[in-house]
Image (cartoon, helix red, strand yellow):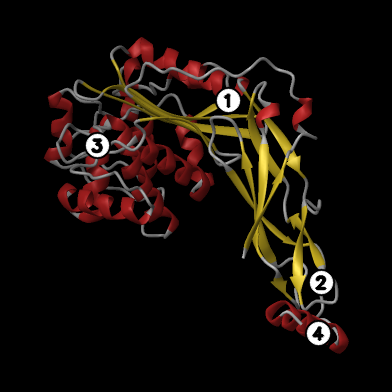
Amino acid sequence: MTLLHRLVIALALSLISALPGQAFETIATHAWVYDVTTNTVLLDKNGDEPVPPASMSKLMTIEMLFEALKEGRVQMDTTFGVSPKAVSYTAMGGSTMYLQLGDRPTVKELIQGMIVNSGNDACTVVAEGLEGTEEEFARKMTERAKTLGLEHSTFANSSGWPDPGQRMSMRDLGMLSLHLITAYPELYSNFAETDFDYKNRAPANANNRNPLLSLGVGADGLKTGHTEEAGYGLVGSVKQGDRRIIFAFNGLQKEAERGQEAERITNWAFRQFSLKTVVTAGTEVAEASVSLGSVPSVGLVPEKDLQLLIPAGTSNGISADVVYTGPIKAPIAKGAKLGVLVVHRPEMEDQKIDLVAASDVGPAGFMDRLLTAFGHLRAQYGM
C-alpha cells in the first residue's frame, strides 16, 4: 500500500523576503533555461522543437573531438590535413578560421578555430580527419547524440551549414552543453577564449561572438549561431557563486538583440530565484510504519541536503509529500531507500529526493510475531 503524508516546508523558506518573481517573457521563438545546481528547468518555450541550430550545432562536432582526445585517439598536437572542401567554406562566405590548402593545423588550433572563430573550415577538417568524410562524420554525430540522450537532434554536416537534415532542439543544446562542462572539465575552458588568429590571417570580427564573455557576469561559454533561416541564437553558461545556469535560444532578428536577450535571461535567472537548503541530510521528515519489526516505525531522512530554487516571494506556496509503500517489512538496514520526498513549488517542476531509513530495524521477537499473526486472524475472521 502506498502511503502519502502532506508536509508544509516553511523553516528555511520563511527567510525569503524578496519581491514576487515575475514570469519571464522572451522574444526568442525557442528558448530553454536550466539551473544546473538544482536540476531545475526555469524556462521552456518550445524547447523540444527541432529547429535549424546554425553554428550552435558545432558543439556536437566539438564533443566528438573532445571524446577522441579523452579516449587517446588523437592528441592536442595531432595534425590534420586541409581539403579543398574545407577551404571552399571561405569562398562561400561562412565563418572561417582562414585555413588554406597545405596547412596542417593541430587539434588544439582546430578547437580554437571552431570555438573562437566559429570556423566551418575547421569543422570540416575535424570531420574528415576523424571519419574520412564529412557525410560519415555527420552520421556518427547523429548516433552520438542519441547515445547522449539528445532526442531531437539530427546532423547532415559538421558545421551547421543550412540543410534540412540539420536540426536540434534548445533542450538538446542545453543538455549537450551540460555534458561538455561535466565530462570534459579540463577542455571546457577553451569556451572562454575570446581571441584566436591562425597564422595572422583572421580579421578582428572573426573572434568569439559570445556577447556575455565581456560583461563580467560569470559567463564561460558556449556558442553563438546565425543563419537567415535560424535567426540569431546563443547557447550559454554562466556561473555565479554556488549556482550555474545553462540556456539556449534562437529566432532573434538582430545581432544586438542576441546580446540583450542573453543578459536579460542571466539577470532574471539569478535575481528572481533564491537558492535555499530546505532540508538537511539526516533530518527526520516522517516515520514509516514497520511490519514484523522490533519497533513499529522507522524514521525517514534525506541522505543529502535538499537545495531548492524558490521563486522570490512564493514561500507560502511550498508544500511537500512523503511517499512510501508500507508497512515496510523488517529487517531494515540503516540507509536503505524507503521513500521519496516530493516538493511542490508554484509554477515550477516538482523536486524529488530519496528518503532512507534513519536507523536499523531488526525483526520482531517470537512473541511479537505471534501477537501480530493473532491480530491478523482476529481482523480476518472477526474473532
Measured as percent of width and height from the top left, residue 315 is found at: 70, 28
- The circle on residue 369 is 4
- The circle on residue 159 is 3
Which residue sits at x=74%, y=31%? 13
Label 2 packing within 10 angstroms: few (<14), some (14-19), many (20+)? some
Quarter of the picture containing the C terminus is bottom right
Whether residue 49 can be seen here:
yes
Disc 2 residue type? Answer: Asp
- The circle on residue 360 is 2
Measured as percent of width and height from the top left, residue 206 is found at: 32, 21
- The reply to whether the C-beta atoms of the residues labelled 1 and 3 are less than 8 Å apart is no
User: Going from the N terminus, do you reach mark 2 or mark 4 first?
Assistant: 2
Which residue position holds label 1? 218
**Mark 3: which secondary structure?**
loop
User: Going from the N terminus, do you reach mark 4 or mark 3 first?
Assistant: 3
Label 4, label 3: how far apart the Cα atoms are: 69 Å
- 252 versus 286 height, above or below: above
Label 1, label 3: how far apart the Cα atoms are: 27 Å
Measured as percent of width and height from the top left, residue 88 is found at: 13, 32
User: Going from the N terminus, do you reach mark 1 or mark 2 first?
Assistant: 1
